[in-house]
Image (cartoon, rainbow, N blue to C red):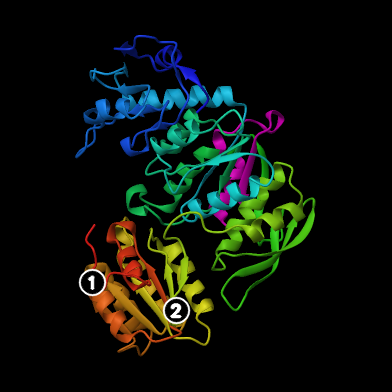
Amino acid sequence: MIALSLAEIAEVVGGQTYDIPDPSVQVTGQVVRDSREVEPGSLFVAFAGEHVDGHDFAAAVVEAGAVAVLASRPVGVPAIVVDDVQRALGALARHVVQKLGATLVALTGSAGKTSTKDLIAQVLRHKAPTVFTPGSLNNEIGLPLTALSATEETRFLVLEMGARGIGHIRYLTELTPPQIGLVINVGTAHIGEFGGREQIAQAKGELVEALPSEADGGAAILNADDPLVRAMAARTKAKVIFFGESGEADVRAENVRLTDRGQPAFRLHTPSGASDVTMRLYGEHHVSNALAAAAVAHELGMSADEIATALSEAGSLSRWRMEVTERPDGVTIVNDAYNANPESMRAALRALAAMGRGRRTWAVLGKMAELGDEALAEHDAVGRLAVRLNVGKLVAVGGREASWLQLGAYNEGSWGEESVHVSDAQAAVDLLRSELRPGDVVLVKASRSVGLERVAQALLPGGTEGEVAVR
């Protein structure tokens, strides 16, 4: 974080200081909420959670080098006490962002946010120092913590914004007002909470409504291939840039293909020129993500050749997202178990089909959460798609939703032994260990709550030979 005195922080967040002998002392380290991340000069943010109360760690973090604690009550060590710690954290982030002078790029969407954010950050790093959301810490706590990690050298701040309801993204844009806003897509993730895709589009579109006008440098980057996103052009005063494979897109891809390893290659076209891209990531769905990143980079002054080089060098920065590992025996494990929704599940299955040409393929799939009334139809559709893509074997893991996956596969074709329903992760591991053979490709994917990453980890070299570890 940029250096701020405790007195300035207290004024910004409207807090009262306790046990602080010298308010001019500055916070020169990071603002953290995890006591294990404290370093000399840190400000520790104490949240009172359901199971762990950060206030209980106050003495320990100060002993470890924290300058003070942002807390909701006095804690016996230097502290700034506020009524609402979360609101105070947001106010501090807004203050720091205003002082930074960095260009803020915000993005949202139903699927692919984290992968796209990682691509944008890797491309912009070629131009100037860039700070970006780690993993998918995209809510009202993770976003301000990311913003506060920026320093005086930061020129680009790339922030992923998530939403579970109307108004969530509007609140996040108030904390960190973006100059560039990107909407990747409107899908069915969290449709059970929103009530429909139109409501999801309403929530995601709050990002472009928050942008400054074109005259003030605002730019909305919109997916030309998604009608609900394309329609958001009418909701913003900012300059509009379309990306996609559509002919009307300002930034588009031509001659899209997959290499023998399932990695996308294409000809990138931008208003400033064209250049060839061959990605290190897996799956054709990354083409759209790459075009979104290219549109942002173009708006920030990078040439087509610079963008293509950066995209071709970019790798996966976040865990369990199409994480590909080749075992010594020739088995390929694709760990995409961080999360799942219908769009990302379909993309992963198509990537599996491309990677597995001429090889035996396994789709180890589990529940897609928060689909509401659409859950049965969506799980059934994924099972059917596995058959249409000629996946060698579907292993459906879990309860009711897993049975729907298997039912879809059974109803789509004459699948018998090609699909199997197992009760849990351990049963899936036992099955795979007994039946995998050299050259097989295994995709593991489900919603985060299912914890199927344990299956992938158990199958990797050095994985646990006994029971799957319970989280």
Identify the residue at image location x=38%, y=58%. 338
Horizontal and vertical percent for residue 131? Answer: 55, 39
Question: What numbered label is drawn on residue 426?
Answer: 1
Q: In terms of image quadrants, where is residue 340?
A: bottom left
Residue in the foreground of this view, choosing between 146 and 232: 146
Q: Position of residue 308 (x, y in %)?
A: 71, 57
Chain part drawn in magenta: 208-234
**Is 446 one of the magenta-colored residues?**
no
Instruction: Identify residue type, mark 1.
Output: Gln
What residue lies at 40% left-to-right and 32% top-to-bottom? Answer: 39
Q: Residues within 10 Å of mark 1 (few under 14, many from 20)?
A: many
Distance from label 2 to label 1 (Cα)? 23 Å
Q: Residue at x 38, y 14 (%)?
A: 14
Q: In the displayed image of the protein, which residue is found farthest to the right?
A: 273
Camera-near label (2 vs 1) is 2
Camera sees residue 175: yes
Element class at badge 1: helix
Tag 2 residue? 328
Vertical order, 155 against 273 (above or below)? above
Q: Residues within 10 Å of mark 2 (few under 14, many from 20)?
A: few
Is tag 2's residue or tag 1's residue first in the polypeptide sequence? 2
